[in-house]
Amino acid sequence: MATVISGDNQSKSRIQRDTIKKALISLLKWKKKQIADQKEPISGNVDDFFYLLLTLKKIPHKDFTKAPKKIPLPHSLHPPPEFLRSCLIIDDRPKPNSQKLTFEYADKKIKSLGIPISKILKLSKLKSDYRTFDSKTELLNSFDVFLADRRVIDMLPEILGKVFYKNKRKIPVPVELRRDGDWKEEIEMGFCCSLLWLSKGTCSVVKIGKFGGMEVEKMVDNVVAAIGGVVEVAPKKWVGVKSFHLKFFDSLALPIYQKKEITKD
């Protein structure tokens, strides 16, 4: 009987590190040439992230596209948490069978655990104080990373709107904030992960690195881990995967995995 390999180990068995590394190096050369060929500095927000592009064999069921999936990475896409402006959205709605999560409780717990959160924002305050486009834009620009109680994640697209979700730059990362849960582990994992939001088509992307901000070997580590994480949450796992590519937002997509289709004569 063959050994069953899952998650990270299975991605390593199907996609070689050398294949990933060669694709990343090619993309880096392309990006450096693009920058060198620019006659004038590019103004505005430039997307310098590397992306892992997932192509599924079939369009996913709508249940898979409702909310983002957390993809843990060994190397964070961000600076250390203490140097980040971070906002934690908590669920302060009354609970029928448990105590309401108050700002005071969350603030005390965060401080006692030494977690570097810049601002704690109650769901009720988010809904009342950030109704306009301008207020939502100001909130978006005030923080580098947003984390949110998993129980309110499905509500946030309607509350935060297109300001947050159109380009998916700062979608809140879901974290488990049960009173008896391990907040420190959950939030630390939230700082060191990427998000996969399965699209309503067959292609979706997840950030795995940033130009100029990470060594090639660390980006390879992230790609291997991301493939394992993506497959775990993808419909039918490896069976449903058609291909994986690597790309910048504005580059060609370089293939690192293509499922071989068996044809019948």
Image (tube, rainbow, N blue to C red):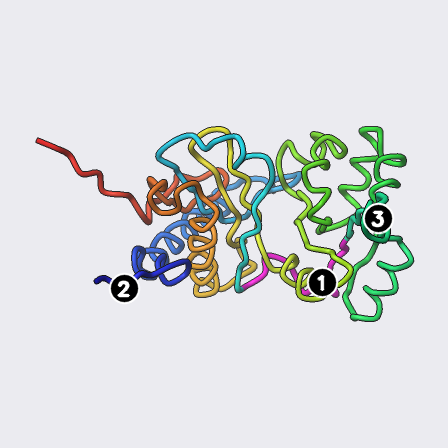
Residue at label 3? 121
Judge whether residue 84 is colored magenta. yes
Q: Earlier in the sequence, mark 3 or mark 1?
A: 3
The CA distance from mark 1 to mark 2 is 35 Å
Quadrant holding the N terminus: bottom left
In the orientation shown, which residue stands out farthest toward the front?
97
Residue at label 2? 3
Q: Main secondary structure of the magenta part?
A: loop
Q: Earlier in the sequence, mark 3 or mark 2?
A: 2
Question: With respect to residue 84, does 252 lie above or below?
Answer: above
Q: Amino acid at mark 3?
A: Leu
Q: Amino acid at mark 2?
A: Thr
Residue 54: percent from the left, percent from the top? 42, 42
Residue at label 1? 181
Residue range highlighted in magenta = 75-86
Judge whether residue 243 is colored magenta. no
The part of the image, by quadrant, that contains residue 182 is bottom right
Q: SS for tag 2?
A: loop
Q: Earlier in the sequence, mark 1 or mark 2?
A: 2
